Image: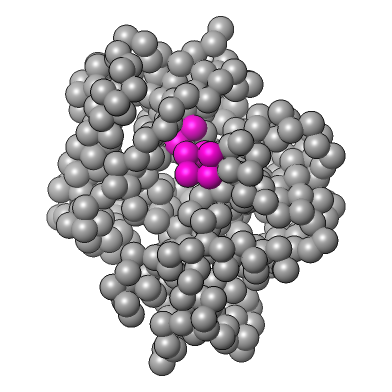
Amino acid sequence: MMLTAIGLMSGTSLDGVDVALIETDGKKVKAFGPSGYRPYTDFERRLLLQALTEAVHLEAREARPGILLEAERIVTTAHAEAIASFKAQNRIASEDIDIVGFHGQTVLHRPAEKMTVQIGDACALARAIRIPVMHDFRAADVAAGGQGAPLVPVYHRALAQSLEREGPIVVLNIGGVANVTYIDGDTLIACDTGPGNALLDDFMNRTTGQRFDTDGRMAAQGTADAAWIAEALKDPFFALPPPKSLDRNDFAKRILRNASPTDGAATLTAFTVSAIAQIVPLLPQRPKSWVVAGGGARNHTMMRMLREKLQPARVESADALGWSTDAIEAQAFGFLAARGLKGLPLSYPATTGVPIPMTGGIVARP
């Protein structure tokens, strides 16, 4: 049975809430619906960054000490407003939607300690939008010994199968953290590769006051520090085989000092690309094509560097295939919500390291 699902995503880039509607049976996507976006205000973004800092000290995933309680309220309100605006703009009634997939905002991800924390009150959200809300997608996987991330590979596989293209195909999502899904027939492998836009965005904000390097213009004018990149790539994470995952702040201590805005942007962009390339020798075969989604797909300098680094493989943006570069992760959580409702697996041993295929998610009713 086909379900009409709305997916919500507030990612590690902390830019806002993506909304997307899809029709799916949890195995295939019948149709893409409209998508929308509700940006965080500067105040909200600052508060969420503060929440990330304070969450480092969390010892219980349900605890919301200090600023975290206010951050959770802001996240919940922003998602409710995103849904309300989306429904109004597209003339969609609550009763037309079967399920909403609500990821929440990750503030801490430490799977080795069986801790993953996403803030956002799903019960309050369900009451506000009058639609059932599936949430807490990662907890069951982490409790069972998995990494709890990435969760989007099953959606990437559904998209890739529609291409009817010779594999291996890799879907690369570059948000705050970058992650890959390797698809070759029935083989599905996934992991985080390292920082995506997080280090670059934080550097831009710190040195120029800009939220990100628009189109990669700043990086295009600079020169990358090859020695800094080589040193950063010595981190043991890059040699680990998949599956593996990261917290947004795992590389935050690697600060570029005395770098100009242009050289710093060039260095951090090249570091993200080099980190992605490090996964290639760890895969069963060299990918023949890469499909890039997330904010990184909008960075022309990052895309150019990827094409140079990953040649002779084909590298193209998700938009070029008729997918949605911006909405793909929100679509994925609509898809995952449908799978969760049907008890289908969300994660696998080769995607998160969980011992057996695991379903997940909890439903909050209005």
**Viewport quadrant of the C terminus:** top left
Residue 52: percent from left, percent from top: 30, 59
Q: Is residue 199 above or below residue 124?
A: below
The residue at the point 65 percent across, 69 percent down is: 305
Q: Please state if 12 lies on the left or on the right of 293 as rendered.
A: left
Residue 207: percent from left, percent from top: 33, 80
Q: Which span of residues is magenta-colored?
A: 324-331
Camera-side residue: 363 or 209?
209
Q: Please state if 207 lies on the left or on the right of 254 as rendered.
A: left
The magenta stretch spans residue 325: yes
Which residue reaches farthest bottom? 258
Q: How many marks?
A: 0
The residue at the point 76 percent across, 54 percent down is: 314
**Is residue 247 visible to us here?**
no
**Viewport quadrant of the N terminus:** top right
**Is residue 259 visible to us here?**
yes
Camera-side residue: 263 or 344?
263
The residue at the point 41 percent across, 82 percent down is: 261
Quadrant hosting residue 90: top left
Residue 295: percent from left, percent from top: 48, 54
Camera-side residue: 37 or 355?
37
The residue at the point 83 percent across, 55 percent down is: 286
Coloration of the structure image: one colour
Q: Is residue 61 above or below residue 132?
A: below
Quadrant hosting residue 278: bottom right
The magenta stretch spans residue 262: no
